[in-house]
Image (cartoon, grey):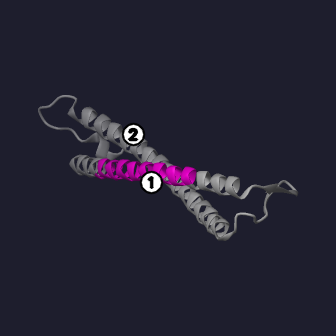
Amino acid sequence: PPSPKAQVTLVGIPGAARTMGSAFKSMQDKLAVESNDFQALQKDLNRSMSNRQQFVQQYNENDMVFKELEKLEEDANVFKLIGPVLIKQDLVEAKSNVGKRLEFITNETERLDKMVKSLENKQETKHREITELQKKVQALAAQQA
């Protein structure tokens, strides 16, 4: 049996109680959907921030390598670890490779920064929408009481 709140009858408006009940259910359903969307945005934001952190760490490591390569003289021996083997590499080529890696990491970090900002804005908007829906649901519940 329906709860006493759902049995509110408005005098002179046929079917009004049924309309209010379905409007309440509809708002609750929309609130559930919006909440799920908000949680999905949170997951995306956390994943993007985690990826950004990894890129920052990689940048720091590669920057340290680049600075060490800068200190070397032109005829210094440079080796690159490929699997379990050290392979001799030209100093200029090593600097170039690390420089390109730093550039790539910088670009990815900037891309992730934009993505994080966008997700934060979407999350803020979604939060406002949820808050408004909650107010409407509470107001409708109070009308039915």
- Under circle 2, the secondary element is helix
Q: Which residues are magenta?
A: 103-131
User: Is residue 130 rendered magenta in the image?
Assistant: yes
For residue 7, the mark is none
Main SS, magenta region, reads helix
Whether residue 2 is visible, yes or no, is no
Instruction: Tell me if 70 is positioned left or right of 121 in this view.
Output: right
Query: Where is residue 75 drawn, in percent x and y?
Result: 75, 64
User: Residue at (67%, 65%) from the top-left corner?
Assistant: 69
Whether the residues at callouts 1 and 2 have beta carbons within 8 Å, the answer is: no
Query: Where is residue 42 drawn, in percent x and y?
Result: 47, 53
Residue that label 2 marks: 29
Q: Residues within 10 Å of mark 1 (few under 14, many from 20)?
A: some
Tally of marks: 2
User: Residue at (25%, 32%) from the top-left corner?
Assistant: 19
Which quadrant, please, contains the N terminus? top left
User: Residue at (77%, 55%) from the top-left corner?
Assistant: 89
Q: Is residue 32 above or below residue 113?
A: above
Residue mark closest to the camera, 1 vs 2: 1
Nearest the viewer among 126 and 51 is 51
Whether residue 120 is visible, yes or no, is yes
The amino acid type, in three-letter code, at marker 1 is Asp
User: On the image, which quarter does residue 20 sit in?
Assistant: top left
- Under circle 1, the secondary element is helix
Label 1, label 2: how far apart the Cα atoms are: 33 Å
Residue that label 1 marks: 113
Q: Earlier in the sequence, mark 1 or mark 2?
A: 2
Nearest the viewer among 24 and 37 is 37
